[in-house]
Image (tube, helix red, strand yellow):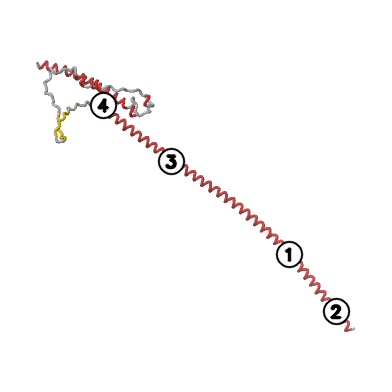
Amino acid sequence: MEEELERALSEKGRELQAALEELRVKEFNYKVNELKSTLPLLGRCIICTLRLPCKHFSETSDMPSVSPLSKEIFSSQTYTKNLDASDIMPKLTKAEPKEFSIRYRGRDNKYSVPAQERVVSLPNSQKLKLIEKIETYREEKIRKEIEKIQEMKEAEKRQKKEMQTREALRLKHVKKQKERLEKYKEEIKIRNEQLKKKYDEEEKNKRKKEEKQRKYIEIKKKELKEYYQKKEMMESISKQKVFDLEKEIVSIIKG
């Protein structure tokens, strides 16, 4: 009897294991289809799960529509309804529904609450969610890195633009200083030419004045020489006349 019961339990266990394995595969496919159906709503590719555009699709409208499977077709009741283990399983008392009472306007009302059904959560579903979180984190990190690189590029562009602006201002200042220097040199040149011209005129006037002075002195010297010559001649004539007069007077006195 015990051997038959053990054999029946073993056979029913294998059937139950096969049914649960098929249920696990079906639920995994359901989760995959559910994820694929939600990816277009998030703007992600149904193949690589990256944000659009990617190497597979450029827009959401290019992706084929994915219809998720109905969850009822792989429920535990569907795969275990053909497993009749009532003849080998012990009889269990039916669980009574849980009740709770609330007080409403001074009266007690009782409500029945059915026992919560066990929610099946397969490791593959958790793995898909974890992969999605990791992918989201990776994309967020890549996005931050791209933003950081873009900010660095923008900062480099601003710095380059500021350097170009400063260089343009410097060149403008240098050009202005060169123009002022050229203007100053031109003014110095004109001033030197004017000074040279004035100096030449002064030298010319000075030479003329000196020449005139020299001629005047020569004329005066000549006049003075002539004057002394005339004076000497007049003195000589006067002396001769005095001598002749004295001689005449002496001759008159003697005569």
Residue 234: which numbered mark, if any? Answer: none
User: Which amino acid lies under the numbered mark 2 shown in the image of this protein?
Assistant: Leu
Residue 47, position as x, y percentages in the image: 33, 24
For residue 223, above or below residue 105: below
CA–CA distance in space, label 1 to label 2: 42 Å
Residue 40, position as x, y percentages in the image: 34, 27
Q: Nearer the viewer, mark 1 or mark 2?
A: 1
Residue lying at 85% horizontally and 79% vertically, measured from the top left: 245
Q: Label 2 near label 3: C-beta < 8 Å?
A: no
**Is disc 2 placed on a helix, strand or loop?**
helix
| Mark 1 or 3, nearer chain start | 3
**Direction from residue 99 to residue 123 in the image, left or right:** right
Residue 64, position as x, y percentages in the image: 35, 22
Q: Which residue is mark 1?
A: 216
Q: Which residue is mark 2?
A: 245
User: Which amino acid lies under the numbered mark 1 shown in the image of this protein?
Assistant: Tyr
CA–CA distance in space, label 1 to label 3: 84 Å
CA–CA distance in space, label 2 to label 4: 173 Å
Label 1 environment density (alpha carbons within 10 Å; few <14, some 14–19, many ≥20): few
Label 4 environment density (alpha carbons within 10 Å; few <14, some 14–19, many ≥20): some
Q: Label 1 near label 4: C-beta < 8 Å?
A: no
Q: Nearer the viewer, mark 3 or mark 4?
A: 4
Q: Nearer the viewer, mark 4 or mark 1?
A: 4
Q: Nearer the viewer, mark 2 or mark 4?
A: 4
Q: Which residue is mark 3?
A: 158
CA–CA distance in space, label 3 to label 4: 48 Å
CA–CA distance in space, label 4 to label 1: 132 Å
Q: Which residue is mark 4?
A: 125
Residue lying at 51% horizontally and 45% vertically, measured from the top left: 172
| Mark 1 or 2, nearer chain start | 1
User: Which amino acid lies under the numbered mark 4 shown in the image of this protein?
Assistant: Ser
Residue 243, position as x, y percentages in the image: 84, 78
